[in-house]
Image: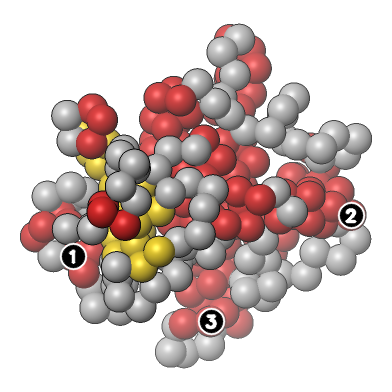
Amino acid sequence: MVCSRLFPEQIIVIDLYTAATPNGRKISIMLEEVGLDYAVHEISLGKQEQKRPAFLAMNPNGRIPVIVDRDNDEFVVFESGAILVYLAEKTGKLFPREEKARSRVMQWLMFQMGNLGPMMGQANVFFRYFPEKIPAAIDRYQHEGLRLLTVLDTQLAGRDYLCEQYSIADIANWCWAIGHQWSGIDISGLGNLQAWLDRLAKRPAVERGRNIPQSKSGNETRKAGEKIIIR
């Protein structure tokens, strides 16, 4: 159990089960942006903790991130896109209410969930982790990753964010696009994309959230916007 006495005035709202991956960072950034106090439970992917019964009881698919909303009868939410929407609706932040604007944000969120994340994820696997180098697979996923990043670059022409205002669509896509070098993808010439990556990186909540989890111990009590204190 996270030791909440570290912040006597703090009421933990969200338990976040996560790891240092693009999908995990989406949620820590979102929690920092919306200002909810939360407890971080680091899941060791190397130890396959996400496949253990206790975790599978929360997410049968055995993937991070997962949140538990203590403020809503211990309600469990898995899948990073679903968590972003849930937190946005819970707080009324980063997800417009107007029908068409809301749909545009959802479309770009689904772009990341169904395209950018899977393609760059496979690029990471074959470029970085797969024991055998398969040039055709590397080329296929890097090429598709670059194509999708070019789509973002085109959308960002003449605008600061993917939609009318900063939203969960920006958070989701940024967390994957910022790792283009790790995927072996060169974004030279994609000036709109690079400017957007730099712009979001300067947001205080993004700077904090992208570095969570930090600890080796596995648990942190996080007061949104303040220094992390490790149990």
Residue with the mark numbered 1: 51
Measure the C-alpha gap from mark 3 to mark 1.
23 Å
Residue at 88% from the left image edge and 39% from the top image edge: 157
Mark 2, residues whose alpha carbon is within 10 Å: few (<14), some, or many (≥20)? some
Which numbered mark, 3 or 2, is in the foreground of this view? 2
Residue at 62% from the left image edge and 33% from the top image edge: 167
Q: In this view, does 191 lie to the left or right of 124?
A: right
Which numbered mark, 3 or 1, is in the foreground of this view? 1
Which secondary structure lies at badge 3? helix
Does the image show residue 109? no
- Amino acid type at mark 3: Arg
Answer above or below: position of 50 versus 134: above
Quadrant for the N terminus in the image:
bottom left
Answer above or below: position of 32 versus 180: above
Residue 47 at x, y percent in the picture: 24, 78
Residue with the mark numbered 2: 191
Does the image show residue 192? yes
The answer to whether mark 1 and mark 2 are in CB contact below 8 A is: no
Ranked by sequence position, the earlier of labels 3 and 2 is 3
Mark 3, residues whose alpha carbon is within 10 Å: few (<14), some, or many (≥20)? some
Q: Which of 203 and 166 is in front in this view?
A: 203
The answer to whether mark 3 and mark 2 are in CB contact below 8 A is: no
Residue 193 at x, y percent in the picture: 80, 51
Answer above or below: position of 202 versus 50: above
Q: In which quarter of the image is residue 48?
A: bottom left
Residue 88 at x, y percent in the picture: 48, 28
Disc marking residue 128:
3
Which secondary structure lies at badge 2? helix
Ranked by sequence position, the earlier of labels 1 and 2 is 1
Ranked by sequence position, the earlier of labels 3 and 1 is 1
Which secondary structure lies at badge 1? helix
Q: Residue furthest bottom?
A: 132
